[in-house]
Amino acid sequence: MTITAPQTSAPPSVSLQPTGWLRYLSFSVDHKVIGLQYLVCGFAFYLIGGAMAGAIRTELLSPVSDFMPRDVYNQILTLHGTVMIFLWIVPVVNGAFGNYLIPFYVGARDMAYPRLNAVAFWLIPPAGLMLISSYFITGAAQSGWTAYPPLSITTPAAGQIIWILSVLLLGGSSIFGGINFIATILKLRRPGLKLMQLPMYCWAMLGTSILVVLSTPVLAGTLIMLSFDIVAHTGFFNPGLGGNVVVYQHLFWFYSHPAVYIMVLPAFGLVSEILPVHCRKPLFGYTTMVYSIMAIVGLGLVVWAHHMFTSGTPPWMRLFFTIATAFIAVPTGIKFFNWLATLWGGRISLNSAVLFSCGFIVNFVLGGITGVALAQVPFDVHVHDTYFVVAHFHYIVYGGSVFVIFASIYHWYPKVTGRMLNEHLGRLHFLLTFVGFNLCFAPQHWLGLNGMPRRVAEYDPQFALVNQISSTGALLMAISTLPFLWNVIASAFNGAIAGDNPWRALTPEWLTSSPPPVENWKGEPPLVTHPYGYGTPADEIDLNSASGSDLWRSGQ
Amino acid sequence: MLLVLGGLWIGQNINLLPVDASANAPIYDELFRVLFSIGTILFVGIVGLIVFSLVRFRRRPGQLGDGLALEGNLPLEVFWTAVPAIVVLFVGLYSYDIYERMGGMVPLSHGNHSSEMAADQRVWGGIGSTQDSQTATTTGVTPLPVEVTAMQFAFLFHYPEGDFISGELHVPVDRPVSLRMEAKDVIHAFWIPEFRLKQDVIPGQPTVLDFTPTRTGSYSIVCAELCGPYHGGMRSSVVVDSADDFDTWLQSNRKPPATEA
């Protein structure tokens, strides 16, 4: 006997959005699709930018300029910086993870402005392709990612203009994203969910988006003025026409220093999500974490001139920016000590996500220490624009943000695909990346202290050996992407089935199926008021699973 | 304690810097040693904590339970807010002191250049050895003026004392030197690693740089601001001569007076 199922009220409505793999190439308004579009697109540009880094390190194997013409070298270094910042780290730590996770975290079914969201993503591929193709069509910009005039005015104009257009599009994408995140976090929270109950990544994205919305328009305005100087021969920044070149630097760094926080604050947020799950402990010091994010946002807006200590700034300005910059170390330090305290006393699974997160902490601490040193005017005057600075900011943006991107991919891959990544390949990837990264960039501190300026194709022969060591590290980093790529592709088809919540996590994105359905949950979104409610209170430790020292500690 | 001592030892005994050859280089090295010691202590301490935590608190086979439900500890958090704040404040004040000893805080309009400059021209300066020039004025030794012109891709040094142009900077040891710098095309930066001095050379905005060389020898002058395709090749050298050698050099290069018709 068969039971006739009750007539469904309506046949499954025909979706206006494409389904299947095609939706990843479409103007989809699903935040999860958009998040993955950002991630995959960003990773493709990471490979391009990485190939450029490889070309730079190959050129620097020998003290003479022998691998490529000098103007091509300058084009490559300009593209490397621009691609890595605007097409890889900013879109991935903000766009990719932000779009995927934020609606889950606030208990919403999508972002506040889904169509704006899709527009923001679809600005990126054309802007990126335009930037890369400028190398083949007209020759790319060759004045560095900072595009300081008068150099950017005197180098070939076509490449520089394409660079400006492309950065304007990417900046627009970033502003659209920022507005969307602010609206989603503040206005789309599930009823009953208070701000101080949000997962930390929401706070990080709120802070980041405030920075994006406040500072990116300044960059846009500056670049438009620069393009007028190039095309219409206005004299904003052209000293020959009475312009002032230092003004450009102030305007540029008013965006581009906050840009560093736009790249690392989301990374801080992601680490704050990953560590508690794998340590089985609450995030230590939630409230101080929130306040330190907001302190970093505030201070981050008033430190820009520390990039200009040798540019002819008056003494009082140097002093002010030294102190403001050094004080960023305080809220940043709070976050790091809180993570260490989160590790302390946990039950840490030493998987790839945790290894990359801890690698991030180690690298970022070193980058932070050199950062406080660089904030001191007398110190900076010697090492400004040298390889010491190159080492410092790669420790921040690669050792910091990129390590976190990898940690996040290991952590959320089961959520996105429903399958686990291979742990052995993951650990191999971590080992190669960590060793290669430190081998590549640690020696560059010494190079800078001893007299090697940055952005050079040829250098004093006494630095040859250390540069070769550095290039070896870069080669290791290039090799390290191979096990990762293999792992990600093969595991999508053959990985172990993950189940809905392989990490036994409590944050809302895990309280649905893996991969999640369109609109995130079947039925009501869950109300998660304790996103970090892991751990056993000291008085309830299960005697069977506790070790002696746990009992000893709890007896204190 | 061991960590602090170890950090101090490393900071004092591992030298990552090139030789010092100007009056402000030893002051710089003092700052560097302090920063290096503090940095080493912090870095080794934090890495030690991470490695210890990862080993000590790793999940052992068969353990299924969670860790301790520690949500925070206010005294501890106040402690690690206060300590970095104090360290940062100390470093800031100390580097301010160093900066002052290097002569960075002296308002330049009252410096020894003001007479030479047109009144409406704004001159920004880098760090200079103003203390030395002050003592110099009392002892009657005037700083050696040199006009530096930076262009793609060379530095030119004009000596007003002899009215000639040199492609190499020659300076006498232990006498203050005052560089007045201007760029012709794009921004360059004048850097002598052994002097621990750098100053951007900016078109349309003259800058000054004062220093006192203390060690004879030949050192590199490096351009440290991307200035075009041959930026890496834009190098020159500074030769620090003894006073006698410098005078000989100056005399041999001096433009013969009244050769012009």
Image (spheres, coloured by chain):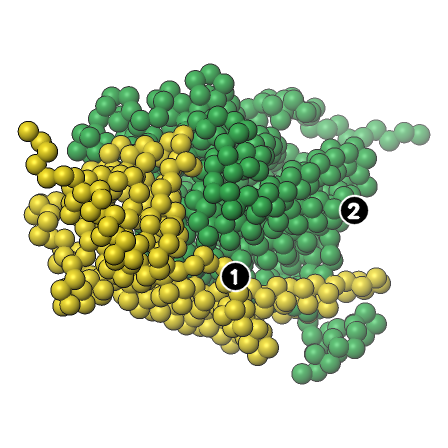
Chain colours: A green, B yellow
Please provide percent x and percent y for residue B227.
35, 35
* Amino acid tagged 2: His
Per the model, the C-alpha gap separating discs 2 and 1 is 30 Å
Please provide percent x and percent y for residue B238.
33, 48
| Placement of A380 over or under A26, stated as above or below | below
* Amino acid tagged 1: Lys
| Placement of A523 over or under B69, stated as above or below | above
Disc nearer the start of the sequence (2/1): 1
Looking at the image, which residue sits at the far right?
A: A1
| Placement of A14 over or under A221, stated as above or below | above
- Towards the viewer: A477 or B213: B213
Question: Residue at image x 14%, y 57%?
Answer: B112
Disc number for residue A335: 1
Q: From the image, state whether disc 2 or disc 1 is nearer to you.
A: 2
Q: Residue under label 2, please give it.
A: A424
Question: Residue at image x 23%, y 64%?
Answer: B132
- Towards the viewer: A467 or A502: A467
- Towards the viewer: A437 or B196: B196
Q: Secondary structure at mark 2?
A: helix
Mark yes or no: residue B232 visible. yes
User: Does residue B76 appear left or right of residue B220 in this picture?
Assistant: right
Mark yes or no: residue A108 visible. no
Chain of the residue on which disc 2 is drawn:
A
Question: Residue at image x 60%, y 23%?
Answer: A25
Q: Secondary structure at mark 1?
A: helix
Q: Dot 2, how many residues are within 10 Å of its Cα: few (below 14), some (14-19), or many (20+)?
A: few
Splitting the image into 4 quarters, where does residue B185 fall?
Answer: top left
| Placement of A323 over or under A161, stated as above or below | below
Q: Dot 1, how many residues are within 10 Å of its Cα: few (below 14), some (14-19), or many (20+)?
A: many
Have a look at marks 2 and 1 and say if they share a chain.
Answer: yes
